[in-house]
């Protein structure tokens, strides 16, 4: 299989075996360690955002791009859509100290927004009525969804700067 990456300049994987990013072994321990090794490279890669953007732009269905497997990219698409659809009044009410029921699927976006507003994990947990562990999980998901949403946005920009 010939694998074309968006760029090799500066990419952390430029000297890695491209097959590392396209596991062909059956699901299991070996595949897990291969995926983990690929993701470790992606985490420190300066091309990560461009790589994910490329995967979205060309609807890459297979492989690890920007540190995300195809399954994770599908999940991120859903989270990014939830983030876009989030009613801003939810965050407004929470900031005003009023109790709001936040559906589990909206939690990553809400936690990520509150964190960026400077709220501590403890304060977020208390406001949402969830354990610190749940805050951490939602925080990671929300940050990844924001990263994905930014990549999606880049896909809709034309080379001349106009947004489609
Ligand atoms: S994000 Fe990962 S797959 Fe993409 S260029 Fe960087 S190291 Fe390679």
Image: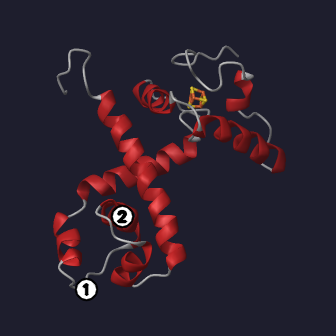
Which element carries disc 1, helix, strand or loop? loop
Residue at point 68%, 36% (across, down): 38
**Residue 115 marker:** 2
**131 is higher (above) or lower (below) than 34:** below
* Quarter-of-image position of residue 115: bottom left
Percent position (x, y) of residue 152? Answer: 35, 36
Question: Viewed as shown, does residue 95 lie left or right of 120?
Answer: left
Q: Nearer the viewer, residue 81 or 124?
A: 124
- Horizontal relation, residue 159 to residue 104: left or right: left
Q: How far apart are marks 2 and 1 (CA)?
A: 18 Å
Which mark is on residue 63? none
Q: x%, y% of residue 100?
A: 26, 81
Q: Give the SS element for disc 2.
A: helix
For residue 68, which quarter of the picture? top right
Residue 37 lies left or right of residue 89; in this view the side is: right
Mark 1 = which residue?
99
Residue at the (35%, 73%) spot, across then down: 103
Q: Is residue 33 above or below residue 9?
A: below
Q: Residues within 10 Å of mark 2 (few under 14, many from 20)?
A: some
């Amino acid at each position: 299989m010939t694998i074309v990456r968006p760029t090799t300049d500066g990419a952390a994987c430029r000297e890695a075996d491209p097959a590392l990013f396209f596991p062909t072994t059956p699901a299991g321990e070996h595949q897990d360690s291969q995926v983990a090794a690929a993701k470790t490279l992606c985490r420190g890669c300066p091309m990560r955002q461009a790589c994910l953007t490329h995967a979205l732009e060309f609807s890459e269905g297979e492989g690890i791009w920007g540190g995300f497997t195809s399954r994770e990219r599908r999940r991120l698409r859903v989270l990014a859509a939830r983030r876009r659809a989030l009613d801003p009044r939810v965050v407004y009410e929470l900031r005003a100290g009023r109790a709001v029921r936040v559906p589990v699927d909206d939690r990553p976006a809400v936690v990520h927004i509150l964190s960026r507003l400077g709220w501590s994990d403890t304060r977020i947990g208390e406001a949402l009525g969830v354990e610190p562990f749940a805050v951490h999980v939602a925080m990671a998901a929300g940050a990844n969804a924001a990263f994905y949403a930014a990549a999606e946005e880049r896909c809709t920009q034309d080379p001349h700067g106009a947004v489609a």
